[in-house]
Amino acid sequence: MHLFTIMEKMDQDEVSFDEFVPGLVSFCLFTRSELLGFMFDLLDQDKDGFVSKVDIFNYLLQMKQG
């Protein structure tokens, strides 16, 4: 969901092709450390600087709900 939030510019319910391609390309150009930092930020939902069990549980729950 976080990925789509970053890409969405106009409509909050869908991502157009014009929004998807530049977003996908930018993720493909990430270095390993940038990708790990992005994943850390994605999992650290309360932004306290730690990925806790609660953060992971909330992320997985969000993925299950779609």
Image (cartoon, helix red, strand yellow):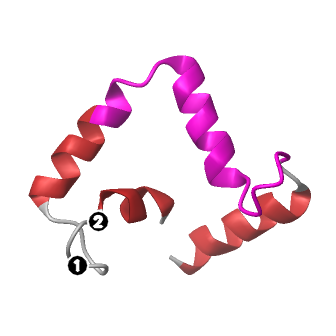
Q: Is residue 54 left or right of residue 31?
A: right
SS for callout 1: loop
Task: Write down the residue under mark 1.
Answer: 11
Mark 1 is on which residue type? Asp
Q: Residue furthest left?
A: 18
Q: Which residue: 43% across, 56% down?
A: 3
Q: x%, y% of residue 24?
A: 28, 41
Determine if the magenta segment contains residue 36. yes
Tell me if residue 21 comes above or below residue 12 in the rendering: above
Q: Residue 42: which disc?
A: none
Q: Residue furthest right?
A: 53
Asked if the residue at tag 2 contacts the one at tag 1, i.e. Cβ–Cβ closer than 8 Å, the answer is: yes
For the magenta stretch, what is the residue range? 26-50
Q: Residue 8: which disc?
A: 2
Q: Is residue 22 left or right of residue 58?
A: left
Tell me if residue 25 comes above or below residue 46 in the rendering: above
Determine if the magenta segment contains residue 25. no
In three-dimensional space, the C-alpha distance between marks 1 and 2, rounded to whole angstroms, equals: 6 Å
Q: x%, y% of residue 64?
A: 60, 73
Give the overall secondary structure of the magenta segment: helix
Q: Which residue: 85% across, 46% down?
A: 50
Q: Which residue: 29% across, 65% down?
A: 8
Give the quarter of the image for residue 22: top left
Mark 2 is on which residue type? Glu
Q: Which residue: 69% across, 73% down?
A: 61
How dense is the environment of label 2, judged by Cα within 10 Å: few (below 14), some, or many (20 and up)? some
Q: x%, y% of residue 66?
A: 50, 76
How dense is the environment of label 1, judged by Cα within 10 Å: few (below 14), some, or many (20 and up)? few
Q: Is residue 35 left or right of residue 56?
A: left
SS for callout 2: loop
Q: x%, y% of residue 20?
A: 21, 53
